[in-house]
Amino acid sequence: MGFSKRMHLQRNIDALQIAFRLEKEKRNGSVGERLLMMQYCGFGGLKCILNPIENGADISEWNRSERHLFSPTRELYQLLKENAADDKEYHRLADSMRSSVLTAYYTPPIVIDAIASAFRSNKVNIGKFLEPSAGIGSFIQSFSGDNLSNVSAYEKDILTGKILKQLYPESDVHIKGFEEIPESSGGRYDIIASNIPFGDTAVFDLSYSRSKERAKIQAAGSIHNYFFLKGSDMLRDGGILAFITSQGVLNSAKNETIRRALMQTNNLVSAIRLPNDLFTDYAGTEAGSDLIILQKNSDKRELSDIERRFCQTYTSSDNTTNNMLFENLNRVVHTSVHKGTDLYGRPAWIYNHSGGVNGIAQDIQLMLNVDLAKRLDVNLYNGIQKLQLEIISKPIDEIQPVTGRAITKPGLQKTYSGISTSSHAQLSLFDLFEGPVVTKSVEPSSPEIKKSYANYKQNNRSRGVGNKIRTGGIIGDLFSEPVENAKGSPLPPDPATLREPEVYKGIFQRFYRDDCLAVDNGFVGYLRKVNIKEQVAMFHPLQLPQTQKERAEAYVGVRDSYLDLYQKEAETQFEYKDGREHLNRLYDAFVRRYGNLNSAENIKLIKTDSAGKEMPYLERVVGGVVRKADIFQHPVSFSAATLATAGPEEALAASLNKYGSVDLDYMSGISGMEDKDLKAALHGRIYFNPLEQGYEISEKWISGNVVEKAKEVETFIAANPEHKEAAESLTVLIEARPRRIEFEELDFNLGERWIPAGVYARFASSLFDTEVKVHYSEIADDFSINCEQKNVQ
């Protein structure tokens, strides 16, 4: 089946209409609605959405081969306008959609099913799953046969993210880039799988661009390299990463630094080169890609032969660069190969598969089954490994906590006898204030450590130093300093002081999210498993020195007051003076005691809070003096100034500017005119919309699918024949109907891009009485013709 741009564009429009409707109605989609949304395929390859569509005359600027897409493209943009709260949001939606044209190429679901099936065949049980470039969640869908219960997904494109949220309402979906995943998520996931973006697009992640590691600095400059290193950071030990990516990751000699960095802490499980026509039917493009599967191994000692080849490349006599793994074609899924060029016009080998996506999927699964059986360390994945600890005989007051690597199983976060797991990566976020940080275990189950602690306290009492002992922290204690004995050795935490995570009992705020700071029952901590709908979360307390605790409590008060005030005023368009006074009091008290929010120490604190990204902007510097932001004096989400207008046109403009719609009550209030007088004065400028029971400006009413809209209005009038305003609205819709194009006026030319290449092939084969193959490359915008047999008698 050839790639039909019109069909894919219409499917995208239908899916977005459903997503917007479900969002407005605040409900989950039905089975039928979900199936329609799953036909959404993004805007990769649909370059028509970049063309001008402001008015009907813009069609003259379109390529003739794409003019049949002008009407649905206008319908698409009209859909965005109708569902955007204001012009700012509309432009944000449109820009996000346009930026996805070069990267949003979706993998055929049957291929992802083959990958998931190979994992199941090798008994890979999944606890925590992450799809970092999710699209509409195709990898989530394929792996859902494993009864996934803990799923996270990141999708940067806003429109695609809206559909993703509707398809997987129970999953932890983030409409943001993978680079915004909190550092505390590091070392948590069992499986990370996705078709990741590619290109030399830089990623804004200061932890990478300012890193001392050469590989991370390089990765920040190209998004596909970044996804590999960042994904590896997010894996728990033994976890598996499976990415479909461009051939550049393996073929580029410049990426050897990236590949070697990956091999330092990961085992290579599989690397398979995929055919160039993998995306042809499903995304309308041809691109070389690879499937790379890695397994996290923090204790790795050396590279295997295949891993050394994974790091190296070679350049052949014909000036093509290739990875050493593909010296022969054993690891390439293909049925034919020929010399061509890559996306950038450089010489490259082009692999094709005559079996279509079904044949490709079968070959991938066969190769994966062999690779997983041979190279996947199931024991490492399941956390079954020998823990080697060096036992040293020392006096009891010199005993130090045992450190090593935790034994974990997928989905479990358990710490054994003072052994800190890598899952507490949030340490790097909270590495601030006065002292070093120590991770404490939930329960020090080792009898030796319990005994050493009891003996230590007894010994110190006899020495008269018991009052100097500070109790240990709890799990997630990211601020406290280690307890030391008289000789400076750290002491294990006292089990009596430990407090485990529990359900948050404080006032639940709408802006709470995972890893945000909160105060509950006299403790400062952070929230996990935040469910906004049910208003529940798990509170992870932190044991802090008193000064740090008070600073954090004061900060949380300012943050909650600000966010609550802003959201209330934005939603109600009403000024809350009491809330503003409260915010000023809390802010002034905080600044008097701890300094400005943008001071170095306070910025460290704010960076630990996932809900605090806006807090530094509550201050601005004017002439070297720190000033409060505008929200401390007046609302910033709307204008509180009283507006008086001279006439109906100005009142209409004011209504559109404030609400984005025609609000007759508001217009009447600022103009002093009654509703009927306003409607009479604006006759021809506004029309009654019986479908929404409101008024719309003419530009909005006489746009979109006017034929379908007119049918719906006719149905309304049939039930309400006396409704004069609806009749007038129907009249202008009928007048705006486009003229029917007769068949005789249609013009078909050889070379039209919207006609599938298979039609040309059948036509040429019939015309020349021999088999002719015709192929169209959208990237090069060029046709190629191949005829192996001649018809000369």
Image (spheres, rainbow, N blue to C red):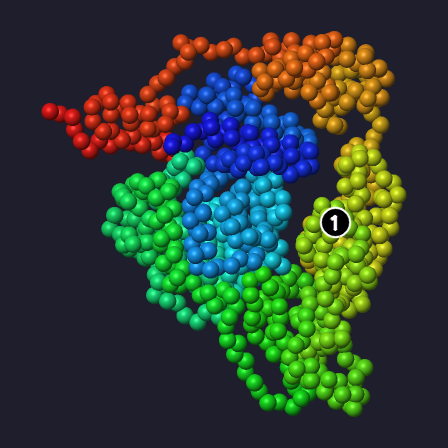
Query: What SS does tag 1 mark?
Result: loop
The residue where tag 1 is placed is 535
- Residue 624, how many percent across, how many down? 75, 49
- Left/right of residue 528 with respect to residue 313 in the rendered view: right
- Left/right of residue 134 with respect to residue 273 in the rendered view: right
**10 Å crowding of disc 1: few (<14), some (14-19), many (20+):** few
Residue 646 falls in which quadrant of the image? top right
Q: Is residue 361 above or below residue 751?
A: below
The quadrant of the rendering that contains the N terminus is: top left
The quadrant of the rendering that contains the C terminus is: top left
Point 57% across, 34% down: residue: 32
Query: Is any part of residue 702 visible from this angle?
Result: no
Query: Is any part of residue 692 visible from this angle?
Result: yes
Front-lying residue, 151 or 468: 151
- Residue 555, how many percent across, how many down? 78, 56
Residue 93 falls in which quadrant of the image? top right
Point 36% across, 53% down: residue: 366
Name the kind of residue labelled 1 in the image.
Answer: Gln
Q: In this view, does 113 lie above or below 715?
A: below
Q: In this view, does 435 lie above or below 763?
A: below
Residue 522 falls in which quadrant of the image? bottom right
- Left/right of residue 588 with respect to residue 319 in the rendered view: right
Front-lying residue, 511 or 30: 30
Point 69% across, 20% down: residue: 691
- Residue 549, how many percent across, how many down? 78, 64
- Residue 751, how many percent across, how many down? 34, 23
- Left/right of residue 642 with respect to residue 180 in the rendered view: right
